[in-house]
C-alpha cells in the first residue's frame, strides 16, 4: 500500500486547495486534497462470472476499520467470509484520516492479527497529556505512571492515521487468505437491498460489472454511520444531536514539538473555545478547533480562516503545510439491540459517539474481535448458537457505556448556558489551584477495554480484559498472552496457577480431549511442572492480568477476556466452560 508519500501529498495539495467543501450533520467531511490513498480494483465475483449462488456463512458489509478487523480475524481462523465495500479505497469517502488515536486494547488485538509492528513503526507513541485553561496548565497525566497500562507488551496509545491501519489490514487479509479458505474482499460492491429469510438473509449488490444477489447465514453490518440496515431491519435507537461544531486542520510544521497530547478547554487564541493538538505519523499534527455553535462549515474551513487560526495559535510567522482540513459536527446514537435476526451491528452502525476519548474506532475494533471468535467457534461446531447472542449482551453494554462517557465530555466542552456553564467555570477555577478538582476537568476520557457485567456467557468473576503481559516459556524465552491465545487456535485457554495434584492433571487431560480447551500450568519462579504445557510467571504479571491470586484457574477467551476464574479443578470448571461456549442456559455463577 502506498498512502501518500509526503512529496506526492504536497504536490496534490497545492493543486487543489479546499476544493469541494461539503458538510452534513454527521460524520461526513470535506475531501481534503492532502492524502493520496491506495486504489483497489473491482474483480467480478463468481455470482457474475459463473452464475454461482452459494449461501455464504458470513457476509460483512463495510470495509472500514471495523469490518476489516473482523475480516482479518476470520481470515486468521480460516473462516470463509465475503467483505463488500462500495468504495475502492481505505478511508471513508471524503472523510480522510478521521481516527488518529489507538488504545492499548486495540494495539493488542492488532498484534494478534499480525499488523502491530507496522503500526508501531509508522505511528507515534505518546503517554503524556496536558490540559490548559487560558495560559494555565490545569491538569497533566503520564500514562506510563499508571499501573493499568504498564505491563502490556503494547504501549498505552499510538497515534496514526486511520487509513494506514485499514491499509495494513487489507494487505494482511490478502496474505492470510492466500493458502486457506479466507476472505473474499470485494471493492466497488454496494449493498442496495436486503431481505431477512428464515435463518439467512438475501443481499442485493450493485457493482460496475452488474448487479447480483447473494445469500448469507450471518450478515455483519459494518457500513458506518449512514447504514441502510437500520431502516431495513427497523432498528430502534436513541439519538442526540447538538450544535457543537469543530474544524480539523492536519498540518506539517517546519519544526517538531514533543509528542504530547495538548488540550485547551478555553484557548485564548481560539476565542476561549477548546483546541486539541496531537502528533500523528508522517510528522503531521492534528489540530482540532472548536467553533461557534452552528458555525458555517464552508466558512470555517476556508483557507484564509484556517491560516488565520494557525497564526493566532503559533504566531504570525508560523511555517506549515496544510495537509487536510475537515469541519465536522457529531451526534450520539445507540441501537437498542445489536443483533436483529441474522444481522449483527458493529462499529458506527452499533453506536456513534463524539470523538472525544477516541472511543469510536477503538470500540469498533473491540466489537469485531468479540464477534470473530464466536462466529468461528459456532461455525466449527465447537460452541452453541446462543454464544452469538452474547455479542449483544457484551457489546451493547460497552456501547451504552461509551455513549454515556462521551456525552458527559461533550457537555463539559459545550455546556448549556446556566447551571452547566457555572459548574464548568467553577471546576476550571478550582482545578487551577487544587488537585482534587482536576479529575473533574473532562476533556475526554480515553477509551478503555470495557468490562462485561451483564454477559450470558461470563461468570461474575469474568468479563474483564486480560492485558498482553509477558511470561517465560519453559525454555526461558519470553512470551506474551497473545502467543498463548494464538497457540490455543480458537479454543478457550485455561491457565492453572501453582501446583497440580495428579487428579487435577488427569482432569485437565480429559478436558483437552473432550472440549475445545487448551490448558497450561503457570508456575512461579521455583514451582515444578506437572504437565507438558507449563510456563513461568516469575513476577506474577500473568496472574495479575488474570485478576486471580494464589492457587487458581483463569479461563481466557480468544478475545483476551476472562470467561471465569475459580480455584478447584472440578465440576465448577466444567460448568464455566459450558457457559463460556453458550452450551448451558442460565446466568453463570
Ligand atoms: C474527527 C474524528 C476523529 C476521530 N478520532 C478517532 C480516534 O482518534 N480514534 C478512534 O478510535 N476513533 C476516532 N473517530 C471515530 C472513528 O473514525 C469511527 O468510529 C470509525 O471510522 C468507525 O469505523 P467503521 O468501520 O465502523 O465505519 P466506517 O469507517 O464509516 O466504514 C464504513 C465502510 O462501509 C462502507 N459502506 C457504507 N455503505 C455501504 C454499502 N451500502 N455497501 C457497501 N459498503 C458500504 C464505506 O465505504 C466504508 O468503507 C473519530 C471520528 C471523527 C469524526
Image (cartoon, helix red, strand yellow):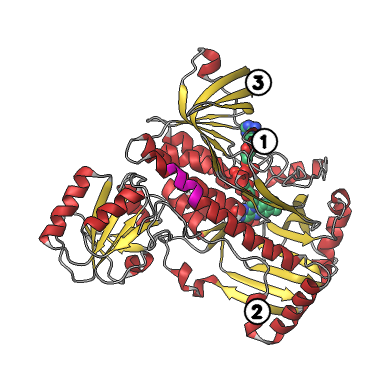
Mark nearer the N terminus (2 vs 1): 1
* Residue 365 x, y percent position in the rendering: 53, 49
Residue with the mark numbered 3: 208
Residue at disc 3, secondary structure = loop
Q: Which of 258 and 403 is in front in this view?
A: 403
CA neighbours of label 1 inside 10 A, class few (<14), some (14 to 19), many (20+):
few
* Residue 357 x, y percent position in the rendering: 63, 61
* Residue 263 x, y percent position in the rendering: 70, 68
Disc 1 from disc 3: Cα separation? 25 Å
Q: Which of 407 and 207 is in front in this view?
A: 407
As drawn, the residue found furthest toward the front would be 586
The reply to whether residue 88 is visible in this rendering is no
Q: In this view, does 501 lie to the left or right of 65?
A: left
- CB at mark 3 closer than 8 A to ligand 1? no
Compared with 424, 159 (above or below) is above
Residue with the mark numbered 1: 231
Q: Do the residues labelled 2 and 3 touch (CB within 8 Å)?
A: no
What number is the disc on residue 29? none
The reply to whether residue 245 is visible in this rendering is yes
User: Which secondary structure type mostly characterizes the magenta part of the structure?
Assistant: helix
Disc 2 from disc 3: Cα separation? 55 Å
Residue drawn at 40 percent across, 60 percent down: 466
Residue drawn at 31 percent across, 54 percent down: 576
**Mark 1 or mark 3, which is nearer to you?**
1
Quarter of the picture holding the C terminus: bottom left
What number is the disc on residue 438? 2
Compared with 373, 283 (above or below) is below
CA neighbours of label 3 inside 10 A, class few (<14), some (14 to 19), many (20+):
few
Q: Nearer the viewer, residue 274 or 492?
A: 492
Residue at disc 2, secondary structure = helix
Region in magenta:
388-393
Amino acid at each position: 500500500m502506498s498512502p501518500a508519500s509526503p512529496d506526492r501529498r504536497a504536490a496534490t495539495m497545492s493543486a487543489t486547495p479546499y476544493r469541494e467543501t461539503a458538510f452534513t450533520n454527521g460524520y461526513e467531511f470535506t475531501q481534503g486534497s492532502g492524502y493520496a490513498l491506495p486504489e483497489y480494483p473491482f474483480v467480478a465475483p463468481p455470482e457474475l462470472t459463473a452464475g454461482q449462488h452459494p449461501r455464504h456463512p458470513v457476509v460483512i458489509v463495510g470495509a472500514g476499520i471495523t469490518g476489516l478487523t473482523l475480516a482479518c480475524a476470520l481470515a486468521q481462523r480460516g473462516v470463509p467470509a465475503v467483505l463488500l465495500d462500495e468504495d475502492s479505497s481505505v478511508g471513508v469517502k471524503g472523510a480522510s484520516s478521521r481516527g488518529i488515536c489507538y488504545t492499548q486494547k486495540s494495539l493488542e488485538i492488532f498484534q494478534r492479527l499480525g499488523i502491530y509492528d507496522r503500526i508501531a513503526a509508522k505511528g507515534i507513541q505518546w503517554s503524556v497529556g496536558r490540559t490548559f485553561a487560558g495560559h494555565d496548565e490545569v491538569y497533566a497525566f503520564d500514562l506510563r505512571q499508571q499501573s493499568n497500562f504498564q505491563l502490556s507488551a503494547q504501549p498505552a496509545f499510538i497515534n496514526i492515521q486511520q487509513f494506514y491501519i485499514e491499509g495494513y489490514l487489507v494487505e494482511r487479509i490478502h496474505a492470510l487468505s492466500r493458502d486457506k479458505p479466507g476472505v473474499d474482499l470485494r471493492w466497488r460492491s454496494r449493498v442496495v437491498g436486503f431481505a431477512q429469510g428464515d435463518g439467512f438473509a438475501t443481499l442485493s449488490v450493485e457493482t460496475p460489472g452488474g448487479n447480483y444477489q447473494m445469500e448469507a447465514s450471518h450478515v455483519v453490518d459494518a457500513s458506518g454511520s449512514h447504514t441502510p440496515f437500520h431502516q431495513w431491519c427497523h432498528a430502534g435507537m436513541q439519538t442526540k444531536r447538538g450544535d457543537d461544531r469543530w474544524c480539523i486542520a492536519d498540518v506539517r510544521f517546519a519544526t517538531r514539538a514533543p509528542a504530547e497530547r495538548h488540550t485547551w478547554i478555553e484557548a485564548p487564541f481560539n476565542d476561549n473555545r477548546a483546541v486539541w493538538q496531537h502528533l500523528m505519523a508522517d510528522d503531521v499534527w492534528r489540530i482540532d478547533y472548536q467553533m461557534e455553535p452552528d458555525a458555517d462549515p464552508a466558512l470555517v474551513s476556508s483557507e484564509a480562516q484556517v491560516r488565520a487560526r494557525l497564526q493566532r495559535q503559533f504566531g504570525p510567522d508560523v511555517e506549515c503545510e496544510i495537509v487536510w482540513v475537515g469541519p465536522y459536527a457529531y451526534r450520539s446514537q445507540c441501537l437498542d439491540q445489536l443483533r436483529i435476526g441474522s444481522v449483527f451491528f458493529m462499529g458506527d452502525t452499533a453506536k456513534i459517539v463524539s470523538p472525544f476519548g477516541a472511543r469510536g474506532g477503538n470500540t469498533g475494533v473491540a466489537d469485531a474481535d468479540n464477534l470473530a471468535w464466536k462466529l468461528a467457534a459456532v461455525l466449527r461446531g465447537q460452541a452453541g448458537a446462543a454464544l452469538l447472542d452474547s455479542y449483544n449482551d457484551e457489546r451493547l453494554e460497552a456501547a451504552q457505556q461509551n455513549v454515556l462517557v462521551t456525552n458527559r465530555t461533550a457537555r463539559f466542552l459545550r455546556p448549556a448556558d446556566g447551571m452547566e456553564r457555572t459548574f464548568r467555570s467553577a471546576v476550571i477555577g478550582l482545578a487551577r489551584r487544587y488537585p482534587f478538582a482536576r479529575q473533574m476537568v473532562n476533556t475526554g476520557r480515553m477509551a478503555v477495554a470495557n468490562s462485561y457485567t451483564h454477559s450470558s456467557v461470563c461468570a461474575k468473576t469474568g468479563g474483564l480484559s486480560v492485558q498482553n503481559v509477558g511470561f517465560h516459556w519453559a525454555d526461558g524465552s519470553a512470551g506474551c498472552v497473545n502467543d498463548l491465545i494464538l497457540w490455543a487456535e480458537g479454543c478457550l485457554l485455561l491457565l492453572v496457577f501453582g501446583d497440580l495434584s495428579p487428579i487435577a492433571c488427569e482432569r485437565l487431560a480429559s478436558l483437552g480431549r473432550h472440549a475445545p480447551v487448551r490448558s497450561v500450568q503457570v508456575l512461579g519462579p521455583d514451582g515444578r511442572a506437572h504437565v507438558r504445557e507449563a510456563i513461568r510467571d516469575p513476577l506474577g504479571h500473568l496472574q495479575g492480568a488474570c485478576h486471580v491470586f494464589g492457587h487458581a484457574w483463569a479461563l481466557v477467551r480468544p478475545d483476551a477476556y476472562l470467561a471465569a476464574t475459580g480455584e478447584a479443578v472440578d465440576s465448577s470448571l466444567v460448568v464455566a466452560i459450558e457457559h463460556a461456549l453458550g452450551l448451558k442456559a442460565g446466568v453463570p455463577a
